[in-house]
Amino acid sequence: MRKLPYIIMCLFIIIAFFLNLLALIKIFPMLFSAPILFLSILIFIMFLNDRRRFRGF
């Protein structure tokens, strides 16, 4: 159950990557696919970087 967010985010990155490939062959607009890929990778990195650690009193 703890790995479910990782799986969902990886699927979102894969879908965004395929949309970007479609944009490169001019089937889907690049104006939409590039920010989607960027945001999906950014959200995944931010989720990985968010540690539950003790930050002091």
Image (spheres, rainbow, N blue to C red):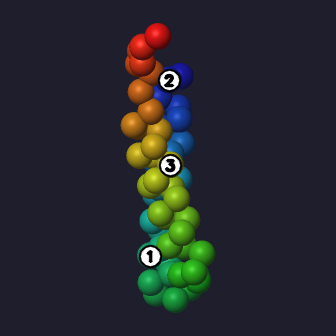
Dot 2, how many residues are within 10 Å of its Cα: few (below 14), some (14-19), or many (20+)?
few
Per the image, label 3 sits on a secondary structure element best described as helix
- Labels 1 & 3 near each other (Cβ < 8 A): no
- Which kind of residue does numbered mark 1 sit on? Leu
Q: Residue 34: image x %, image y %?
A: 50, 73
Circle nearer the N terminus (1, 2): 2
Q: Nearer the viewer, mark 1 or mark 3?
A: 3
Question: Residue at position x 53%, y 81% from top?
Answer: 30
- Which kind of residue does numbered mark 2 sit on? Arg
- Horizontal placement of 17 versus 29: left or right? left
The answer to which quarter of the image holds residue 28 is bottom right
Q: Residue 54: image x %, image y %?
A: 41, 15
Residue 16 in view = no
Per the image, label 1 sits on a secondary structure element best described as helix
- State the separation of the CA atoms marked 2 and 3: 17 Å
Say which residue label 2 marks: 2
- State the separation of the CA atoms marked 1 and 2: 31 Å
Say which residue label 3 marks: 43
Circle nearer the N terminus (1, 3): 1
Question: Residue at position x 55%, y 65% from top?
Answer: 36
Decide: is 49 above or below 53: below
